[in-house]
Amino acid sequence: MAFSLMKMKSISRNSSSSVLRSIASRSYPSYHRPFAAKAEKDEVPLDDGVPTSGICRPLSEILKELNKRVPDSLVRTRADPKGFNVKYVPWHIVNRIMNLHAPEWSGEVRNITYSADGKSVSVVYRVTLYGTDAEIHRESTGTASTTEEGYGDPVQKAEAMAFRRACARFGLGLHLYHEDMV
């Protein structure tokens, strides 16, 4: 059930306990409440198909959506230091795709390491997906030069790279890594 702006304003005016009572008193179909054995007789099923809370899909469905080709309009190209054009999906778009298809995902920086000479920094990032049947995680690394000019600091760049790569391990944008082989 989607909240309208008016409902959101009324929620912000209420105390948290009255909001919880209001949410708890609503009737939702059993597929929106995995803990419910079966729907009550007087319950009217919602036809909008919008999840109302928490984890609502099995991992196989989430992964199927993440493995779909990212539209070309969302893909960017940049030249790497060796002169090759590299296609990528910016981290903020990857983040939005994850929010859309796997709303209960989480991510965390696991490690930040500077090279001995201080010329580069590497970040290890973990993305976890939660489904109704299981949870899985993937980790990846990203490295950035500390001397390279450009937007953002080196840790930020390395984190964005590691985040995109960890999501690619779930299939998101993976086609960009082997596009020239097809």
Image: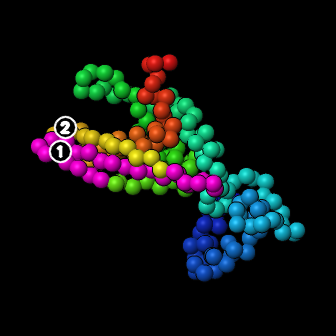
| Residue 18 coordinates in the image, percent (x, y) | 64, 80
> Which one is in front, 146 or 141?
141
Residue at image position (63%, 56%) is 132
**Which of pointers 1 and 2 lies earlier in the amino acid sequence?**
1
Q: Is residue 6 magenta?
A: no
Q: Is residue 131 magenta?
A: yes
Task: Count how many numbered circles sit on residues in the image.
Answer: 2
Q: Which mark is residue 115?
A: 1
Location of the N terminus (image quadrant): bottom right
Magenta extent: 111-136
Give the secondary structure at mark 1: loop
| Residue 161 coordinates in the image, percent (x, y) | 35, 41
What secondary structure is the stretch in magenta mostly built from?
strand
Front position among marks 1 and 2: 1
In this view of the protein, can residue 32 be seen by the observer?
A: yes
Residue 75 found in image quarter: top left
Residue at image position (46%, 39%) is 169
Label 2 Cα crowd, 10 Å radius (few <14 / some 14-19 / many 20+): few
Q: Which amino acid type is marked by label 1?
A: Ser
Label 1 Cα crowd, 10 Å radius (few <14 / some 14-19 / many 20+): few
In this view of the protein, can residue 157 be seen by the observer?
A: no
| Residue 177 coordinates in the image, percent (x, y) | 43, 28
Give the secondary structure at mark 2: loop
